[in-house]
Image (cartoon, coloured by chain):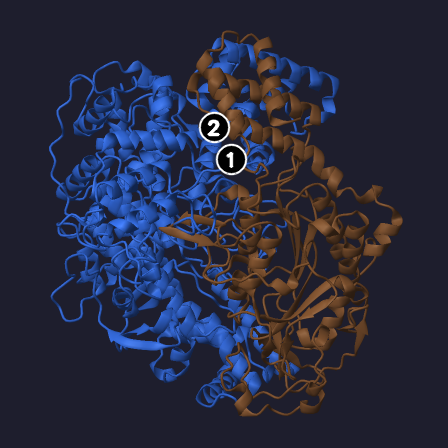
Chain colours: A brown, B blue
Amino acid sequence: MRESELLQQARRDFLLTGAGGMGGMALASLMHGAETVNPLAAKKPHFDAKAKSVIFMFMEGGPSQMDLFDPKPELQKWHGKPLPESMTKNLQLAFIKPSAAVLGCPRVFKKHGQSGMELSDYIPHTAAQADELCLVRSMFTEAFNHHPGQLLLMTGTTQVGRPSMGAWVTYGLGSESKNLPAFVVLSAGAGTSGGASNFMSGFLPSHYQGTMFRNAGDPILYLSNPPGVSNATQRASLDALRDLNLHRQMATGDPETASRIAAYELAFRMQMAAPELADLSKEPQATLDMYGVGKEPTHQYATNCLMAARLVERGVRFVLMMHASWDHHTQIDKKLKQNCEITDQPTAALIADLKRRGLLDSTLIIWGGEFGRTPMVEIRNTKEEGNGGRDHHPHAYSMWLAGGGIKGGQVIGRTDELGLTIVEDKVHVHDLQATVLDRLGLDHLRLTHRTMGRDFRLTDLGGNVVKKMLA
Amino acid sequence: MLRAIIFANLIGSLCAADFAREVAPLLESRCQLCHGAQQQMKDFRLDRPIPSEAGAKILERIRSAKSGFRMPPVGAALTAKEIAALESWIGAGAKWPGDYRPGGKSGHWAFQPLANTAPPAVKNSTWPRGEIDRFVLARLEKEGLQPSPEAARTVLLRRVSLDLTGLPPSTDEIRNFLADTQPGAYERVVDRLLASPRYGEKWARHWLDLAHYADSDGYEKDQVRPYAWRYRNWVIDALNKDVPFDQFTAEQLAGDLIPNATEEQRVATGFLRTTLTNREAGVDRAEDRFDQLLSRVNTTATTWLGLTVGCAQCHDHKYDPISNREFYQMMAFFDAAEEAEIEAPLPGERRRWEEAMPAYLASRGHILERNGIAELQNTWEDKLRAAIAKPGTDIEWDFSVTSMTAMFDRAKKVLLTDPAKRSWRDRVQLTDYFLSSMGPDFGRVPEIRERIADARQQITKLSAALPKLTMAMAVTGDAGYRGSHMRVKGDYRITGASVVPAGLGVLPPVSAAATPTRLDLARWLVSNDNPLTPRVIVNRAWQEFFGRGLVATSEDFGTQGERPTHPELLDHLARGFRDNGWSVKKLHRAIVTSATYRQSSALREEIAAKDPGNLLLARQSRLRISAELIRDSALTAAGLLDARVGGPSVRPPQPAGVAELGYGRLPWNESEGVDRYRRGLYVHFQRTTPYPQLMNFDAPESNVACSRRRTSNTPLQSLNLLNDPVFFEAAQSLAGRVVKQEAAFSTRLNNAFLMALGREPDTLERERLARYHDEQRNIFEREPQSWPKAGATKEEAAWTGVCRVLLNLEEFITRE
């Protein structure tokens, strides 16, 4: 039911209960309330949008680019030897010294798709979608610890308290969904360093914050009626509540009451819609198999990927999928394999499935972490074999994008032969943010919010749209 | 949009087109960043008279709708009203008044001394109850508006109870107030509320928003701070005692420096310990320390001065008179302090603890000796010291040092102190740390590993049985302080010129001393020469009582903030506050006993049209109560609220999976017994995974000072109130209270309304709820299995439904 119809009906019901003689003013303010009911109503973008929704597959901890996306055969030659000081003198790293030895990469890279994109043997399913991917091998950031890095990627600054990307997008565009939140968060694996700051609304009103869809229990907090309260009882309670609220509004004339009534109605619609959303039983078995739902080790992540497709299909604006952790300080080859076995197939399935549903053109997919990893080895336990890992590396790493408004089948940027620095087409995380907003029809310079005495934006003081990414 | 136009017209009719008021602030806030003293884009500046031929060009650019051509190029376009102001200024020759200082630095209203304006004369001499009302009424009369009548007595009682104590009135309190028909009944209620210990709890929460109090470190590891609450106790207590605000200020910023400082004064410096701590092992400790200093400067400036100084971390403030150097001069006050954990026992704790200590230390010694720990610890310390002295030799020991310094604040200092000279507490802490993190070598020798684990287990058990001695997070002067430096472009790694502590140049100097201290800073903030602090503080009080400050941007009194709606009233209140002993309770009393405060909040047609934002105060405002107060109100109506004041934080039930979202997956061990029913103020605040009900209802994230909360209205709030077991239990419990009394439906409904809403229902409400009640009873007749509470009768179940409706009413979460 639309908001206006809802209020019409509410008025009708209310009059039937005997509250005749509503004053002209009360009626006027009710009408006024109807206009201000939904702060999440869809808004026009600044210019024509190429994508309507975003799915950000956030790989928390910093996946290793040289083991997955950015082949560096030179690493093998340097394996076990430190790099010349001339190459490392300006490096500041979290744990290891720039003088640490190089860790060779045992992975095998092959060319994929028409574009011949070189990708690692740990991600065969993703590689099969190479022609959809815009792989950026030249990402960089300034933060080299997790929480600050995640803040910079997700909120545009390393300081806590700013709105997250999903909150900005929702603030700029509102929601296309009448029954679901505009910004949904899905989580799998361990907890993340950034925690809630990856999806909070910061200084924006809290209706822009991400709503966590949970894996166990209610998909949304407090979604289920208390034990013993049937939907019929819930509906009857909401009817009584609405009548009494309307009655009160006639005395106070406060349009805020109408917003409150509308929020309760949306809550009820969510209660009805969310179980349908979470119910995957109507999906064909072939679809479930393609994602890897119902088998290990993919089940949980696959379920999130399929949910992301279903959310976007139902008009949700921004889906943040978090997977932790890719923070491989030790035993990197083994742990990377485990993570890829969990995520690779579902990730590729999501691209294929969105395409099948006709949603890939309007959905922008982003895959990546807050930084990459060093070419040098990190050893925390010298006495055991095969225990080497890689430290945080903010200076050069890889992410990929696909879908709405993105030119697939291409690689942007180049790093040096060891993957230590970028030699071509540097892309700062602010540039990524500017590009994401651009694809949604938002100018990152104009999407601002005034607080604490000045205008703030997602891209802080930086950001340039990366033209090469655009379709 | 309509509102904006009405608002613009309203203001337009209030003040003459006046350069200092209308044109200069506009030029400052929207033009001079690019066309001012700092830079002159296109060689064009707007901080001085402009040549006549430029006028037409300016108007063309500001009127244009073309993006990229329109000025200003970022942010919202100028409003019609703003364009009109510039048109009339340019039309009159774009002159620059001789007494107006370019850049407007010290010309800004907020830096001017407090005006001393007598309350104005008013035509209606019967309405005002005091001086506040004359300021408000004079303005209303000028606009041809009437104030609203006084709110109904039940409304007034609920309003003032919520505002002063955060709790709705009890049924007895309502009956007593309605029965007291003598003059001064309301004032007697006000005095009772001001004297209630609940007052300190309510107002502590506002202060804790500014202090950005939390029970955990923040960032990745987000470790629990087991004694953060000790500072919260101090705040509650100080507000209840009405500690004068100048003293309240000095103790929190510099309690440790007050001569012969008491334990409580040191506890007060916990204000400076609410900064986040990043314990990620890879974090440069110097960076974390720098971030904490930034936080202290920013929090202090927002809290007392209403200024956002943070911009000046990297460069001179673009809008306000705060230079890059001044920022670091302010920071130098805090740079000279270091963090300290101090003993701060509650009454009765110390004696029991002291009695138990000798036996504790003896048993501890036996355990350590039996397991040969001293020798192992010596080896471990030697390795750590070697790694500190010569990093890069052994990567594993390097990592041990990094982890240790991240998790144990004074680790290096303690390690490098001669064991014989360590305090007993440092010795205990270091040994405890060793037992939990034995380093890489011992972990590989099963026999040693087990010995250490055994000692750890026994000591953990022993320590748990030791009577508690509450600690507090405080600061203390840094004996090793070597002076402070600026940082180039705000980067902690690049040291700039040296600075000495000093205040802001736009205000009078802090002190004549060569190196003033935090105590000098505190005294300066509340000195007679500083007009900002009293303005900022009274404005925030006003904000809580009316939903909007006299200056709407209570966090920003700079040139980018809004200007006061009632500047004379603001100064009158500020002056009174400062000159009458800085008494917060007196200030609050003056406000809540005013006729302005006591007005009805109902929207009237003529105000709705003329003043939709209620800037002129021709009525009270309806305000959604805060997250904590929603919880408190539900528990009060339910008769469940635990009445104890102060103490450690509690963990009410929250859904599984919320805490697990954090990196550390710290367990949320639900509190038991009456601890589950404590006020929202006491709910444990874990920064990375905060309690959902608080966040749903707009509690701040507690990372930076929050001067005013937003109020949103979301479906998640509705789900929270409808379905959260905490609120459902409240409905069940309220129903239990209602049904306990043998009475007719109508009487029971009266009681339920009084307990939940502080008033009786009207006819229509009775009819509607009677219908609902019967529907519910019918449902339970049909489906007897559907109501879960053991032993509940059908009547109780039906009443639970009714009470659940009441606790979800908009009125229930609204202060009328």
Residue identifier under label 1? B713
Question: Which quadrant is the N terminus of chain B positioned in?
Answer: top left
Relative depth, front residue between B784 and B25: B25
Tell me if I can see residue B173 in this picture: no
Relative depth, front residue between B423 and B809: B809
Residue identifier under label 2? A256
Tag on residue B538?
A: none
Tell me if I can see residue A26 in this picture: yes
Left or right of A367 in this view: B246: left
Q: Residue at x 74, y 41 (%)?
A: A277
Where does residue B533 sit, x and y in percent of width and height? 22, 49
Question: Residue B576 lies in what quarter of the image?
Answer: top left
Relative depth, front residue between A441 and B390: A441
Question: Residue B621 lies in what quarter of the image?
Answer: top left
Left or right of B192 in this view: A358: right
Relative depth, front residue between B213 and A303: A303
Say if B490 sits above or below B742 in the image: below
Question: Residue B774 lies in what quarter of the image?
Answer: top right
Amino acid on which the number 1 mark rests in the picture? Asn
Label 1 chain ID: B
For the residues bearing labels 2 and 1, Cβ distance under 8 angstroms: yes
